[in-house]
Amino acid sequence: MNLYTKLNKVKKEIGAISKDNTNPFFKSKYFDINSLLRHVEPLLQKNGLLLLQPIYKGYVISEIIEIETGEKIQSGLQLPEIDDPQKIGSCVSYYRRYTLQSLIGLQSEDDDANAASQATKSQKQWVNKDDKIWSAAVDKGITLTELKKHYSISRINADLYPIK
């Protein structure tokens, strides 16, 4: 079996992963890197695949290697240029989780999937200062309050909007 056949087999065995941690700041659920690894690595190893997650030339890489042939597949994200080691550590953990998640194409199981899909359907389009919609609204004399009824506008852009 080649790498992709084995990876497909692993993906089928994994199924959807339940988010088991809560971010108190955003009040959202997620699965942390350790939970993800506990779930994924035994299945990779069972199928003759090795997971490595090195940091190379400023990138966090998730790499899955077929042990017998050396065939590999990678996903990576460039780390931001930050001097604070604690923030870099947080970025590394976050990037390890998301590069692995995207590499395998993992599904996550949301407790509030219905609420999330409803929110997505009713979400307003974002408008920024340089958008055509912004320019047309200003040209027509539409107030910020009226524009916000139909579009989402960040606080920074709202402060820049000329017609309050």
Image: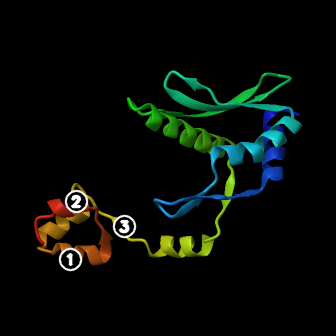
User: Between marks 2 and 1, how big is the CA–CA gap?
Assistant: 13 Å
Q: Please report the residue visible at 12 percent of the width from the left and 68 percent of the height from the top.
A: 139
Q: Residues within 10 Å of mark 3 (few under 14, many from 20)?
A: few
Q: Residue at x 65, y 69 (%)?
A: 111
Give me the disc on residue 157.
2
- Where residue 122 sits in the image (x, y, percent)? 45, 76
Q: Quadrant of the C terminus?
A: bottom left
Which residue occupies the foreground of this view, 32 or 148?
A: 32
Front label number (2 vs 3)? 2
How are the residues colored?
A: rainbow
The reply, left or right, for residue 131 in relation to residue 102 is left
Residue 23: horizontal and vertical position, in percent? 53, 58
Q: Nearer the viewer, residue 33 or 154?
A: 33
At label 2, which amino acid type do we have?
Asn
Q: Is residue 66 above or below residue 160?
A: above
Decide: is 130 above or below 76: below
N-term-proximal mark, 2 vs 1 = 1
**In the image, what residue occupies the spot 68% across and 48% down?**
105
- Could you tell me how far apart the alpha carbons at marks 2 and 3 are, in whole angstroms? 14 Å
User: Which label was assigned to residue 145?
Assistant: 1
What element does badge 2 sit on? Answer: helix
Q: Residues within 10 Å of mark 1 (few under 14, many from 20)?
A: few
Q: Quadrant of residue 110?
A: bottom right
- What's under tag 3, amino acid-wise? Gln
Q: Nearer the viewer, residue 151 or 112?
A: 112
Q: Are marks 1 and 3 in contact (CB under 8 Å)?
A: no
Q: Earlier in the sequence, mark 2 or mark 3?
A: 3
| Label of residue 125 in the image | 3
Gap in angstroms between the C-alphas marked 1 and 3? 15 Å
